[in-house]
Image: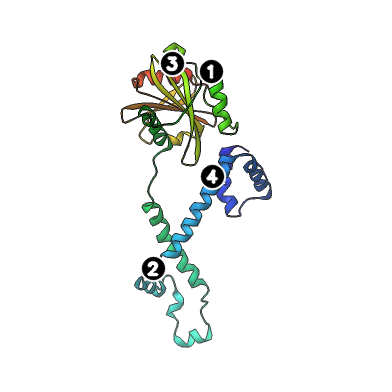
Amino acid sequence: MTCDETRELITGLLDGELLDAERASLESHLRECPDCRLAVEQEKRVKRALHASAERVRAPGALRDRILSDRRIFPEKNRTRWQDYLWPKPRLALPALAVGLILTVALPAFFLLKPKSEPIASEALKTYRLFSRGELSVQRAENPNELVEQLTRAVGGHFHPMGYDLTAMQLRPVAGLVRDIQGRHILIAIYQGRGGTLFCYTFFGSEEDAPADAAKFFDPVKKINFYAFSQDGLNAVLHREGEIICILASEMPMENLLALAKSKARPS
């Protein structure tokens, strides 16, 4: 089972809706994948927040009276008093209906009021400015292979940074670090040289991690989508290789950065 398949079944797992075979495969994957285990915990927190929000929401008395007296919803209300004594109306359905109506109001309010987080790609680019200001702690290494090994070990060997050779642009990897952003591990390889500074971000993700306003370019030869966007004067290009997302970020002109990303991208 892949991580993408696992993410699609998490809600069913928590709601007890999976078949035995699906649940067994999912639990086996979760034992081996810390990122998916984290996704399960995040889903649990969302469900707890929803339940807590629903418990705090109470419909106004006037609204409850209007709902309970609506003949279209409760036609039994039209019965005469002596009929009510002969055929008592079931009361167990009323609390369930009330909870359903409250959730109908509470859930949209919860998501509308919940602050929206930035796309993970935008959050990741903030590390570039921190590094420029000397506010970022990094692991330095003279040997590129040593740097790759350090970063790969930091995430338990589950994936490794993109090992691009940028010597033709007079750039070489000099440092790296691991950042936890929105619950995901992101490997950052830092290239420097006469060509300036370039960050290479690597993490598990999908093309949905690109900003909504990113410009999309399709390479018909490699059959890869590239997403170009800018933030505070910093240019970036995102693309996907299998389950791995790579973002190249630099202050070089966007057309040069996009050309670089297309030349180095490897089809899945």
Give amino acid for label 3. Answer: Leu
Q: Residues within 10 Å of mark 4 (few under 14, many from 20)?
A: some
Look at mark 3 in the image and give the residue it sits on: 171
Q: Comparing marks 1 and 4, which lies closer to the viewer? A: 1
Residue 66 sits in which quadrant?
Answer: bottom left
| Mark closest to the chain's N terminus, 4 or 3 | 4
Q: Comparing marks 4 and 3, which lies closer to the viewer? A: 3
Cβ atoms at labels 4 and 3 below 8 Å apart:
no
Q: Secondary structure at mark 3?
A: loop
Q: Which mark is residue 23?
A: none
Question: Which of the pair 194/77 is nearer the observer?
Answer: 194
Q: Which mark is residue 143?
A: 1
Using the numbered discs, state the Cα–Cα distance from disc 4 to disc 3 in whole angstroms. Answer: 36 Å
Give amino acid for label 1. Answer: Asn
Q: Secondary structure at mark 2?
A: loop
Rendered position, 115 above or below 159: below
Question: Which of the pair 131/122 is nearer the observer?
Answer: 131
Look at mark 4 in the image and give the residue it sits on: 39
Q: Which mark is residue 59?
A: 2
**Where is residue 97 shown, x and y percent of the image?**
47, 68
Give amino acid for label 4. Answer: Ala
| Mark closest to the chain's N terminus, 1 or 4 | 4
